[in-house]
Image: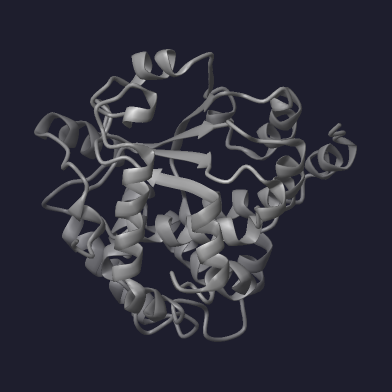
Amino acid sequence: MESSVDSFVIPPTNDQLRIIRDEINEDEDRSPHVENLLYTWINCQPHFPKKYDKRIIRTFLRSSKYDMERTKAKLECNFTVRNLYPDIFSGRSTNAADVVQALDTVIIVFLPKFTENGNKVSIYKLKDTDPSRYDVYAVTKLFFMMYDLTLTSQYPNAGEIAIFDGSGLSPNHFVTFLTIIKIVTPILRRAYGTRLKEIHILNAPPLLEKILSVIKPILHHKVKNAFNVHSSSRTLCDYFGKEILPSNYGGKCKSLEELMKVHWKILNNNEEWFLEQENMKITKTIPKKIDNNLYFKESDIQGSFRTLQID
């Protein structure tokens, strides 16, 4: 098994690539020059790490539609969160006890084929439904390990689509989930610039309406109305097509379990890379402007969490 995340990715077609490049403002002639300008700027920042993966820098530019200032802000935040949240961004080894537990608890997979419009699709599902086994920080660490590896891909994407399978979710799972969502959401938005286009929910639990009432205020306005609730895997398959989805949902792709094994092998083969990433953080005092940018101040969000009742 190859160590590259691209070893299991089906490259976008020429038509998909044209759509993607139009979406992210990528110009094959101009883009290398913009990248070099950004590298020069990074190397001049005394509080930035001296070694960094240029593949990730390129992906940050793409997610910012080649807007230099937006890219700089995301990079500053990204290097900063690694200082602020060591429980998530340190000790990232497939042999670490918390990561092993997360691998036994959840399924997180990135599908190999792009959608017709050039979007990347990921699926999230419980593997072990016992809430006492669900360590939300370990699961979050595993997610960011896998997500960081996807940033090294040579292939751009127009955006991201998340599919959540609610099978086996209990009220206790949601209680632990709500303890982390206020951290994860600003990280994804401001320290990664995730371009989330759609959220699809299958096997939705009865608590869905209450949970969405809390989550929606902290999502980007473009995502708030992008929720799609599916009554069955058939409607999910009709929406995405059999070529994209795993066999668990009537698709022609490998099963979730097989895909998770592929992901684990790639994670395991990148052990040294993850060790190098431990140094991808701010090396001096965190500038106040960055620190403030990573927290939500909206009182309505805080109030939503305080008043949420989960029976």
Q: Can residue 61 be seen in this view?
A: no
- Residue 245: x percent and y percent? 32, 29
Is 206 on the left or on the right of 233, as rendered? right
**Vertically, is 61 above or below 15?**
below
Q: Which of 35 and 263 lies nearest the eye of the viewer?
A: 263
Q: Can residue 296 be seen in this view?
A: yes
Q: Which of 270 and 307 lies nearest the eye of the viewer?
A: 270
Q: Which of 182 and 134 lies nearest the eye of the viewer?
A: 134
- Residue 79: x percent and y percent? 50, 71
Q: Residue at left 33%, top 75%? A: 273
- Residue 275: x percent and y percent? 40, 80
Is 170 on the left or on the right of 277, as rendered? right
Q: Residue at left 38%, top 80%? A: 276
Is 2 on the left or on the right of 158, as rendered? left
**Vertically, is 267 above or below 205?**
below
Q: Residue at left 37%, top 75%? A: 42
Q: In which quarter of the image is the C terminus?
A: top right
Q: In which quarter of the image is the N terminus?
A: bottom left
Q: Which of the 4 image quarters holds residue 97?
A: bottom right
